[in-house]
Amino acid sequence: MVNEEKTSVIVELYDLTITERKDDRFGRVVTSKSLKEDDLIKLAVARRTDLSPATLRASLDILKEIAIEQITNGASVYFGLGYFSLIVNGTFIGDHAKWDPTKHSLHVKAAASVALREAIETTQVNVRGMSQSGIVINSVHDVASGEDNAHLTPGGGVSLSGNKIKIAGESHDNGIYLTNLNTQEVTAIAANAVIVNDPSKVSFIVPNGLLAGDYKLSITTQYSSGTNLLKEPRTYVFDYVLTV
């Protein structure tokens, strides 16, 4: 089942503040929509009416369970859109060192499949100029784990770096939000949990009761680099999935 339609993405430009040139920009792909597995199943059924949602869901769940089982037993697995294997983080002292969970951890290494890379190469890119809001989160640093763009630790600190990310304005929508990708439940970060609130850096404490899962982080603000705030709040959703 191959989709022959031409694919395309929109790219917006942002200030590249780390260089000396004032006209340097970097591009980000505009997220057109956010799809879950059930959404993909609906699209598949629409293209192949001989397949039922229940059959696709059951098949997907079984394959995922087997893939996870094999990866956690040391296998390198090609599944879906990529290749997955385990890597070790942390330093060992001596030839006979033992595993120490406080110093060592396992993480997943993922690489895009050949089919996905080839599809990306043929995707049409439309650059539509500077982003109207200018809001961008460049990195999310989890203080407890020391990792960037990967984890959130309940009760721990998180430091965001970016541009125009200061939370400002009277709108009730303004703030920092964590959206659970499985349940779609949205957790708002309390105002008193925000430690630093500057245009290029925002730090906050992750709620202690935040459930384990995969999350998307977003910021909504009316901040502007000028003297006046934006009339309407703008939202930026961070590119990476963050795991609790």
Image: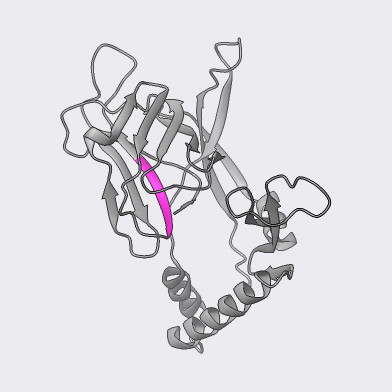
- For image coordinates 47% across by 81% down, the residue present is 57
The relative height of residue 181 versus residue 80 in the rendered view (above or below) is above
Q: Could you tell me residue 213's position as x and y percent?
A: 42, 60
Q: Could you tell me residue 124's position as x and y percent?
A: 61, 46
Q: Quadrant of residue 73?
A: bottom right
Q: Quadrant of residue 234?
A: top left
Q: Quadrant of residue 177?
A: top left
Assign the N terminus to one quadrant of the image: bottom right
The relative height of residue 207 versus residue 181 in the rendered view (above or below) is above
Magenta run includes residue 235: no
Give the dominant element type of the magenta stretch: helix, strand or loop: strand
Q: Could you tell me residue 167's position as x and y percent?
A: 28, 28
Pick the residue in front: 148 or 113.
148
Residue 234 located left or right of residue 49? left
Residue range of the region highlighted in magenta in the rendering? 213-218
Q: Can residue 216 be seen?
A: yes
The relative height of residue 178 versus residue 202 in the rendered view (above or below) is below
Residue 192 located left or right of residue 68? left
Q: Could you tell me residue 186's position as x and y percent?
A: 28, 53
The relative height of residue 225 versus residue 164 in the rendered view (above or below) is above
- For image coordinates 48% across by 41% down, the residue present is 144
- For image coordinates 28% across by 31% down, the residue present is 221
Pick the residue in front: 72 or 99.
99
Magenta run includes residue 215: yes
Pick the residue in front: 77 or 19.
77
